[in-house]
Image (cartoon, rainbow, N blue to C red):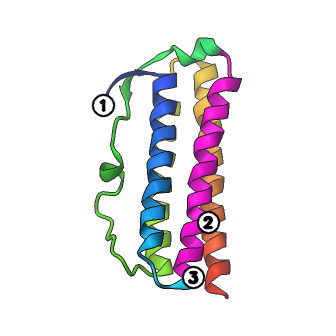
Amino acid sequence: MRYQTVKDVLEHARQLHKQISTFYKQLSHRQHQERVKMLLDYLIRHETNLEQMLQRFEQDKDQAIWNEWFQFAPDEKLQQALAGAAVHADMSVDEVVSLALQLDDYFINMYRDMSVNASSAAVKAVFENLLAFEEHEKIRIVRTALEINDF
């Protein structure tokens, strides 16, 4: 971890969502199971939407908070966020869900840490809102996976 501004942290999160979307596309191309492909297609849209949401979020908020600094900001790469995940060509729906939840937990933990270490109430509110949103999205992933398993 290193010093970063709020804007840097959000840009880091946006780039990770973009990389995760690309990662899911690569997994989808190697899949033969229709249910897994459906789940991966959903996850691709999910990550793309999160990336776009963060981009809009950066554009909509007060610019003053974007320049506030964090001493211990995240700088992990996608490979670090995937640490310990068993990724292979013929993953099951459950394995993909487990992977997606691991990645969501990365963002949940990051936003929680940023909220706790925020230097102002406005910055704290930004990361608390992102935390709540990410926790809600995690629930949506589980619901979607259950629906796909019911097909």
Question: What is the distance, in whole Å, between disc 3 and disc 2 at their CAs?
Answer: 11 Å
Answer yes or no: do the residues labelled 1 and 2 have beta carbons within 8 Å? no
- Residue 142: horizontal and vertical position, in percent? 60, 69
Q: Which residue is mark 3?
A: 35
Give the SS element for disc 2.
Answer: helix
Q: Residue furthest front?
A: 29
Mark 1 or mark 2, earlier in chain: 1
- Vertical arrangement, residue 122 with respect to residue 94, above or below: above
Residue 31 or residue 8, whichever sits in front: 31
Question: In terms of sequence position, does the residue under pointer 3 or pointer 2 come before the other?
Answer: 3
Where's residue 6, x and y in %?
50, 23
| Magenta stretch: helix, strand or loop mostly | helix
For the residue marked with disc 2, what is the amino acid?
Tyr
Determine the residue located farthest toward the top in the rendered image: 64
Q: CA distance from mark 1 to mark 3?
A: 38 Å
When asked about the image quadrant of residue 87, the answer is bottom left
Residue picked out by circle 2: 42
- Residue under label 1, please give it: 1
Is tag 1's residue or tag 3's residue first in the polypeptide sequence?
A: 1
